[in-house]
Image (tube, rainbow, N blue to C red):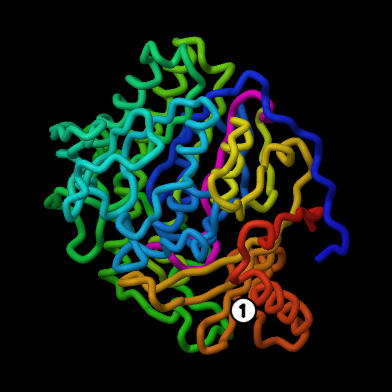
Amino acid sequence: MPPTPTATPEWAPSSTKPNVLMITADDLAYEDLEYMPHVRSLLADQGTTLTAAIAPTPICVPARASLLTGQYSHNHETVTVNGERGGYASMEHTGTLPEAMQEAGYDTLFTGKYLNGYGLRGTAKDVPPGWTDWRATTDMSTYNFLHPRINHNGKLKAYHRYTTYVMRDQANEMISAPERADKPWYMWVNYVAPHHGGPREADDPENTGTPVPAAEDKRSFDGLELPDTPNMFRTPTDVPPNSPSRRSFDAQKRAELRIAHQQRVESVQAVDRAVASHVHRLQASGQMDNTIVIFSSDNGYTTGGHNIEGKLRHYQETLRIPVVLRGPGIPAGRSLSTGVGNPDLATTIMAIAGAEPGRAQDGVNIMPWLNAPAQDRVIPLSAWRVSDGNKQLYSGIRFGDWTYARYPDGSEELYNMAEDPYQVRSLALRPEYADDLAELRALDKKYAKCAGDTCPKEFYPAG
């Protein structure tokens, strides 16, 4: 690690209090941007793409809780999807981003999927604090692509339309509402696709979950092959026996994963068009020049990379998320490899609004760094058992090209993506990397339980 951090560039929030529109897609991998031409042309070409952004806990609920709090999972304590430490019921819904934005004078607007478990066990009519206009799908209708049910400010309504289009129209209705002229606003639109869901169709694979594409997009990528990359269906060399990459897929499962990959790509076509509709609505209503748009995902996803189906693991394909920003003060057409985690997005949004966070912030405001040269930053990694969150699966560190993971039994994996971009050779057992391993091991120990100002905030010149 370089001995001297880079001084934070000068930056001040805009006196005009810009609107902020955050659009996320559930389980969208970074590589899926290749199949989203509207996101590329309307957001990336007009703004900045953060190519090294990650989800420090790469699974649905913890990642979205970080987007609500600006904290790492071990601090907001909603560490997984199910059980006493997972899902909607485990989240403390006060001191969040929307509350801070309201206190800063913003209207706060939500539509789409909230946290897993929202709508179950008597919570279908809940409206979490801090939201001016609340339009969330309720479980399990959230995963029914043709029949979602929405809680609109405490009143339930069933829809019988494709869910992406329902969410699109809800968002555009809020963008166009007369009240938008009265106050600045923050909106979070969280699309379900390409997360798997139903109803099941005849050509779906038998043992692999898939999303449901919109009718006009079905079979539009017929025969699309899985990525032809060195990490596909591959266990890296020198990994410990408990590495999640040590499983294997037979020919039938690989064929099913190919179908899942195709249907994921088909399902994001409607999301891509929806993003275009939001940009056009902002333009038509005269709000585009004073709106910052952030497009992202909760976590990465893979259909076979490192012998993994899904997310949660410490490999690049599941950690990496798309983050694209467009708006006032954001450079146009820039790709930037500065290290960013999704807690930083919440911290940044509050900084943009001049809002006072209701919790100690683990994240940092990335706005000053968008015009600066690329920077490396230490970001702690963690994951917990999906069933209840009571057992930690690994802790680790991402710093620049380095990824380090440590399992509860003390075994380790270490990758240098500058030399090994697909992470197919673990270096943890190689003597020539002992110093690098010791440094990353020390960083993991230092930051595994960091909170607020004790979390890593420094940026260092990349390389």
45, above or below 179, in the image: below
Name which residue lies at 61% across and 55% down. Answer: 362
- Label 1: how many Cα within 10 Å (few below 14, some 14–19, many 20+): many
Judge from the rendering whether residue 298 lies leftward or rightward of residue 454; answer left or right.
Answer: left
Name which residue lies at 75% across and 51% down. Answer: 375
Judge from the rendering whether residue 70 lies leftward or rightward of residue 122; answer left or right.
Answer: right
Region in magenta: 310-331
Judge from the rendering whether residue 2 lies leftward or rightward of residue 228; answer left or right.
Answer: right
Q: Which residue matches tag 1? A: 426
Q: Where does residue 284 sit, x and y in percent of width and height?
A: 45, 10
As for residue 17 lying within the magenta part, the answer is no
20, above or below 357, in the image: above
Judge from the rendering whether residue 359 lies leftward or rightward of residue 143; answer left or right.
Answer: right
Name which residue lies at 14% across and 52% down. Answer: 200
Q: Camera-side residue: 413 or 246?
A: 413
Q: Amino acid at mark 1?
A: Ser
Q: Quadrant of the N terminus?
A: bottom right
